[in-house]
Image: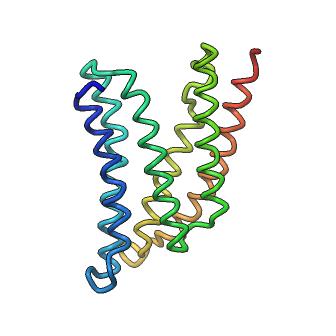
Amino acid sequence: MPINIPNLLTWLRIWLIPVFVTVFYLPPGWVHPQWVNFVGTAIFAVAAATDWLDGYLARALNQTSAFGAFLDPVADKLMVAAALILLVQLGRVDAVIALIIVGREITISALREWMAGLGRRKSVAVSFVGKLKTTAQMAAILLLLYHDPLFDVFDAQWWGTWLMYVAAFLTLWSMGYYLKKAFEHP
């Protein structure tokens, strides 16, 4: 395993998952509920930012590696799955939506592995609709984790729920896109 800044940032993202989840399970009274939402959201936001930063630095510092290419998507999927499970537990996301998103992640990961084994990894490379899905999903998760109204005018739960439905739609669309690309050329 190459030790470099991008890989350390990816490991940081993985290490932040139990910290982020623990914040929401602190005993009642330890922290005001509104601060729990704020701190949990902030930790998730830092973890999400490392996703962009590790890729940028890997390219900018010429520190890309096979291990980093493997670990980065694993960290992303662990982080999203943990957040969705937590949001279902908190009653902020419907379990069906979480299953759609997590199911797609597992399916596309398996598809990418299969295509790589056939020497066709590029046929299922990240697409624009996949990036759009990730953006909607991360914004929705951040809003749903925060949950509380912002400045008494912006309903984070309502907007987060709406964006999560958009993310679920884009999830299905992107899965269809990747499956089509994979099976276009035998």
Please tell me which residue is depicted at 64% across the width and 56% down the height of the picture. Answer: 99
Please tell me which residue is depicted at 63% across the width and 45% down the height of the picture. Answer: 171
Counting every numbered tag in the picture gives 0
x and y percentages locating residue 3 in the rendered image: 23, 28
x and y percentages locating residue 51 in the rendered image: 37, 40
State which quarter of the image contains the N terminus. Answer: top left
Please tell me which residue is depicted at 76% across the width and 15% down the height of the picture. Answer: 186
Residue nearest the observer in this picture, 112 or 134: 112
Residue 73 appears left or right of 177:
left
x and y percentages locating residue 45 in the rendered image: 34, 54
Would you place residue 140 above or below residue 24 in this image? Answer: above
Which image quadrant for residue 109?
top right
x and y percentages locating residue 53 in the rendered image: 31, 37
Please tell me which residue is depicted at 64% across the width and 48% down the height of the picture. Answer: 103
The type of colouring in the image is rainbow
Residue positioned most to the front: 1
Residue nearest the observer in this picture, 121 or 141: 121
